[in-house]
Image: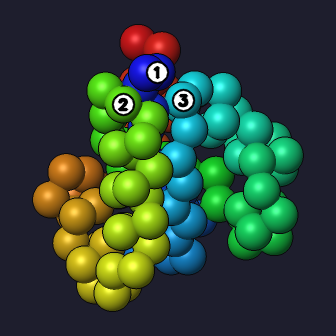
Amino acid sequence: MKGGWVYIMTNGAHGTLYIGVTSDLPGRVTQHREGRGSQFCAKHGLVRLVHAERHEDIRDAIARERAMKKWKRQWKLRLIRQNNPDWRDLYDELNA
C-alpha cells in the first residue's frame, strides 16, 4: 500500500488551521498555495505548511487525519509548536 502524509496548513502563526491527507505532499501543498487545493484554504488564504507527518500506509494517514480533525484547537497548536516552534513554512524543505 502506498504511503501518505497528514499535514496542517495555516495563514499565519496561530491563525486558521486546515488538516489534510495526501499521498503527494509537495503537489498538494502547491495546489493549496495556488488556490486550487480546497475552497476552505483558498477562502482563508491558507498557504503556509506548518506541520507534516509521513505514514508508511495511506490508511494510517487517513486514520490520523480523522483523529486530528476531532482534536481541540489547543492540541493542534501544541503539536505545531512542539515540532515547528517558529511556525516557519515547511514548503521549501519538501524538495530540499
Q: Secondary structure at mark 2?
A: loop
Image vertical order of residue 10 relative to residue 37, above or below: below
Position above or below: 78 against 4: below
Find residue 70 and report its horizontal and vertical position in percent. Answer: 40, 80
Q: Residue 57, position in %: x, y?
A: 36, 31
Which residue in the structure is indicated by mark 2? 57
At label 3, counting other C-alpha atoms closer than 10 Å, the crowd grade (few under 14, some 14-19, many 20 or more) is some
Place of residue 78 in the rendered image (x, y in percent of width and height, measured from the top left): 21, 72
Which marked residue is nearer to the observer: mark 2 or mark 3?
A: 2
Residue under numbered circle 1 = 2
Q: Which image quadrant: the N terminus?
A: top left
Please state which of residues 29 and 54 is positioned toward the viewer in this rendering. Answer: 54
- Callout 2 touching callout 1 (CB < 8 Å): yes
Residue that carries the numbered disc 3 in the rendered image = 23
> Is any atom of residue 50 visible in this view?
no
Disc 3 marks which amino acid? Ser
Decide which of 55, 40 is in the foreground and name it: 55
Q: Amino acid at mark 1?
A: Lys
Is 31 placed left or right of 51 in the picture? right
- Does residue 84 lie above or below 27 as drawn? below
Question: Dot 1 surroundings within 10 Å: few (below 14), some, or many (20 or more)?
Answer: few
